[in-house]
Image (spheres, rainbow, N blue to C red):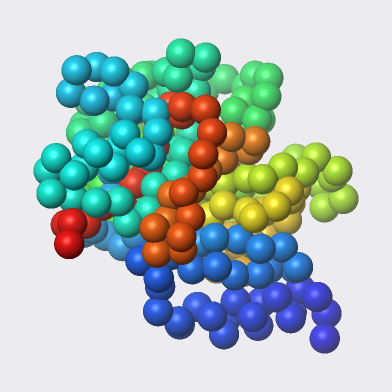
């Protein structure tokens, strides 16, 4: 049995297991990952600033703000790249209001490694849309964050990814099911290259479209997994919340 088929069988065996607070841990091709899911209709949102206009920045602060409304974090992670002042790079939409504009040009760094894309949260579900396709026919997003590069585009890996690349980092991103009803958030437990990370979404999780969020600063808060990653304050955060017990 090949390493790839063994990994896929492992994923299939664990896919039906109950999620621990929306999250589970799995192994693909010898690398570990934490995987967290939201389904359409759940309280998944993007967060950047508080009501006073100050950056939220940390899972701890987000948890305190949610507690004021009787809610708690099910899981949360960083959700896109940002400038030194933690303003989003590219499109950012919160409660239907555009905070930062879409960028369709190529450029330096991972964000500019086109095609890049937009993660969109709608009332009826989710989407990962290539940025220029988004510009040509913008969907109505309640929340949206642009990042890059795209990991998987209509079932194909990003054309610039190399299987033997030695650029390896802890990475995180999001994939969306073909019917748009599930959004699946993944963070690697150790350094992986883009090709491996993208294949996890496509071959391991069966997701036709996926978007890279970041590396190096990638962090996850998943209370059910006993995980609360620390680090410098972040820009955009994506979080699934539920009523507090």
Residue 233: x and y in percent read 46, 27
Residue 74: x and y in percent read 32, 56
Question: In the visual, does 172 lie left or right of 118?
Answer: right
Q: Quadrant of the N terminus?
A: bottom right
Question: In the visual, does 198 lie left or right of 86?
Answer: right
| Residue 184 visible at all | no
Q: Quadrant of the C terminus?
A: bottom left
Furthest-top residue in view?
85
Q: Looking at the picture, tell me which residue is in the foreground, 150 or 173.
A: 173
Placement of 220 over or under 64, stated as above or below: below
Q: Looking at the picture, tell me which residue is in the foreground, 154 or 239.
A: 239
Furthest-left residue in view?
69
Residue at 53% of width from left, 55% of height from top? 186
Residue 158: x and y in percent read 67, 45
Residue at 34% of width from left, 22% of height from top? 55
Residue at 50% of width from left, 61% of height from top? 35
| Residue 110 visible at all | yes
Placement of 178 over or under 214, stated as above or below: below
Residue at 45% of width from left, 44% of height from top? 77
Placement of 218 over or under 232, stated as above or below: below
Q: Quadrant of residue 196?
A: bottom right
Q: Looking at the picture, tell me which residue is in the foreground, 46 or 221.
A: 221
């Amino acid at each position: 049995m090949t390493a790839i088929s063994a990994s896929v069988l492992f994923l299939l065996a664990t896919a039906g297991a109950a999620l621990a607070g929306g999250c589970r841990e799995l192994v693909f091709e010898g690398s570990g990952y934490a995987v967290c899911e939201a389904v359409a209709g759940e309280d998944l949102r993007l967060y950047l600033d508080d009501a006073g206009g100050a950056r939220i920045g940390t899972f701890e602060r987000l948890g305190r703000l949610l507690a004021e409304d009787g809610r708690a974090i099910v899981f949360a992670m960083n959700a896109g790249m940002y400038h030194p002042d933690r303003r989003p790079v590219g499109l950012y939409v919160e409660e239907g209001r555009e905070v930062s504009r879409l960028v369709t040009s190529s450029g330096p760094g991972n964000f500019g490694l086109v095609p890049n894309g937009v993660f969109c949260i709608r009332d009826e579900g989710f989407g990962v849309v290539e940025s220029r396709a988004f510009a040509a026919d913008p969907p109505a997003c309640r929340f949206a964050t642009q990042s890059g590069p795209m990991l998987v585009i209509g079932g194909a890996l990003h054309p610039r990814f190399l299987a033997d690349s030695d650029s390896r980092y802890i990475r995180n991103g999001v994939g969306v099911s073909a019917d748009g009803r599930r959004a699946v958030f993944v963070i690697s437990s150790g350094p992986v290259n883009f090709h491996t990370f993208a294949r996890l979404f496509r071959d391991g999780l069966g997701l036709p479209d996926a978007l890279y969020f970041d590396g190096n600063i990638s962090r996850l808060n998943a209370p059910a997994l006993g995980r609360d990653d620390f680090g410098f304050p972040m820009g955009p955060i994506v979080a699934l919340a539920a009523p507090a017990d």
